[in-house]
């Protein structure tokens, strides 16, 4: 069992991180400062040290020299990202931005510990597979298959990529897939959420600054673009970038060089840019909210992330993946969805997309009292049953039979709704697509799929 030392002065964060690691089978000790850690423990007894950057007394980076061969991960807030980059230059193996995501911190810790010892490289193959499964995109619908094809094509180039889609659709996963399939895969990928950094700091964070460039700039700092040299820079929510920073970013894209804030000297950088946004940049460019020249620089290759509500049966596949992950993280036996829960997830509109699905499933696992995840545990505010629409259409005669010529047979008066549905689908599915079938029946594709499941009517195999 691997041993980890946490050095953090805030007791709430320290205890929360300790509980998380202990639940995942790590032996954990903690201290509130560097002095406390060196006084109580032998640093060389640990497989990993996780320390806050700013501590009472000595800074967390002092542990890098004190621990010698033991890897040190530095925790820092987003506003101190430039300090995290400096910490890595001093010898820290990685940094974790607070507030941290549980899956990401567990993945980071697992990778560091496995790389440190050759003997442990093959000890946890299942963990590696589960971690990879958590972070890969899945989907069999046509929109996702087209997306995978585009990712594969663009990954082999250094072209700038603009990823568009609603919040929660997995834009960062797509960016990581591009990076991992590219020739830059062994170089860093630096991810920045433009909406999370204060407007007054964004230029300094991206481009760095010289000593004395502004009040508080007591030392020269490298920016995140420099930190990504040789690799990939992912700018999430680029639509939130201030106009001044947009001008600097445009020059970086045109000339492959940057100037730190307060400097007149240009620095050449080799960085591939991937940007993402949920906003309409073209419309923003027309109103002057986004630079038009930058928009066209970004619009070399566009990837469109489909919303979850349009991905059909993919929803169940993704839900199963999240269910396995949540059960593993929460130490629960593997649960399963009942039929009604699956039907509900298909019908629900998912305004928060994949992120909302993940949260709903984690909540359901926490609340579950037996082996089944039911609709009420998911806590979804489902709209009225779409099947009522079909029943209404059937009752009013608004269907294909009502729209075709008078010589075609109308539904017999003694046919039930299910009989009529089954007969119509079986008679027409050879000549109609699913979209046309649904349209002629006057219902959505989801409603059509749901009714097929209930009546056991398989889709006609593709040639």
Image: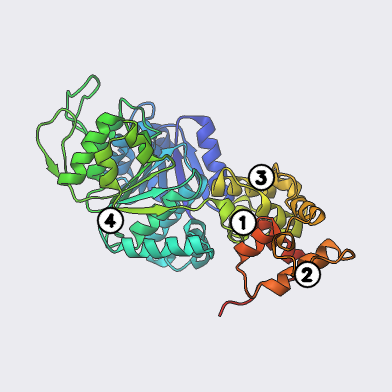
Q: What SS does tag 3 mark?
A: helix
How crowded is the residue under tag 2: few (<14 C-alpha within 10 Å), some, or many (20+)?
few
Gap between marks 2 and 3, in whole Å? 50 Å
The disc, 2 or 1, on the residue closer to the chain's N-terminal end is: 1
The disc, 1 or 4, on the residue closer to the chain's N-terminal end is: 4
Q: Are marks 3 and 1 in contact (CB under 8 Å)?
A: no
Q: Looking at the picture, tell me which residue is in the foreground, 358 or 124.
A: 358
Question: In the image, what residue occupies the spot 30% across and 31% down?
Answer: 202
Q: Looking at the picture, tell me which residue is in the foreground, 62 or 141.
A: 141
- The quarter holding residue 462 reads bottom right
From the image, tell me which residue sits under label 1: 319
Q: Is residue 143 left or right of residue 215?
A: right
Q: Looking at the picture, tell me which residue is in the foreground, 305 or 437.
A: 437
Gap between marks 3 and 1, in whole Å? 13 Å
Q: What SS does tag 4 mark?
A: loop
From the image, tell me which residue sits under label 4: 187
Residue 259, position as x, y percentages in the image:
16, 36
């Amino acid at each position: 069992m691997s041993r980890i030392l946490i050095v953090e002065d805030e007791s709430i964060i320290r205890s929360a991180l300790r509980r998380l690691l202990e639940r995942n089978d790590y032996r954990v000790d903690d201290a509130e400062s560097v002095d406390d850690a060196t006084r109580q423990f032998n640093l060389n007894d640990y497989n990993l040290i996780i320390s806050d950057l700013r501590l009472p007394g000595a800074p967390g980076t002092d542990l890098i020299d004190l621990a010698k061969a033991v890897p040190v991960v530095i925790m820092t807030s987003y506003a101190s990202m430039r300090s995290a980059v400096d910490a890595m230059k001093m010898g820290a193996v990685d940094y974790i931005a607070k507030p941290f995501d549980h899956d990401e911190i567990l993945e980071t810790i697992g990778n560091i510990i496995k790389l440190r010892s050759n003997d442990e490289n093959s000890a946890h193959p299942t963990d590696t597979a589960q971690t990879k499964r958590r972070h890969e995109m899945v989907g069999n619908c046509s929109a996702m298959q087209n997306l995978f094809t585009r990712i594969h094509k663009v990954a082999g180039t250094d072209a700038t990529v603009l990823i568009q889609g609603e919040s929660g659709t997995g834009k960062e996963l797509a960016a990581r897939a591009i990076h991992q399939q590219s020739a830059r895969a062994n170089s860093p990928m630096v991810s920045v959420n433009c909406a999370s950094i204060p407007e007054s700091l964004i230029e300094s964070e991206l481009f760095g600054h010289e000593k004395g460039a502004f009040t508080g700039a007591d030392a020269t700092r490298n920016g995140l673009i420099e930190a990504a040299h040789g690799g990939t820079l992912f700018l999430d929510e680029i639509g939130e970038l201030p106009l001044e920073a947009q001008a600097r970013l445009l020059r970086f894209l045109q000339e492959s060089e940057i100037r730190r804030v307060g400097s007149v000297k240009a620095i050449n950088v080799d960085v591939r840019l991937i940007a993402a946004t949920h906003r309409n940049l073209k419309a923003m460019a027309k109103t002057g909210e986004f630079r038009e020249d930058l928009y066209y620089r970004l619009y070399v290759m566009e990837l469109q992330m489909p919303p979850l509500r349009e991905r059909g049966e993919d929803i169940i596949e993704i839900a199963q993946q999240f269910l396995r992950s949540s059960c593993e993280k929460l130490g629960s036996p593997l649960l399963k969805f009942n039929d009604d829960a699956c039907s509900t997830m298909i019908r629900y509109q998912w305004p928060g997309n994949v992120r909302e699905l993940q949260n709903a499933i984690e909540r359901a696992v926490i609340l579950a009292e037996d082996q089944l995840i039911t609709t009420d545990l998911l806590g979804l505010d489902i709209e009225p049953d779409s099947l009522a629409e079909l029943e209404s259409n059937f009752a009013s005669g608004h269907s294909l039979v009502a729209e075709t010529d008078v010589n075609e047979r109308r539904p017999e008066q003694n046919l039930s709704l299910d009989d009529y549905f089954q007969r119509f689908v079986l008679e027409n599915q050879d000549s109609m697509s699913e979209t046309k079938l649904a349209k002629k029946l006057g219902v959505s594709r989801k409603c059509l799929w749901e009714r097929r499941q209930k009546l056991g009517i398989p889709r006609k195999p593709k040639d």
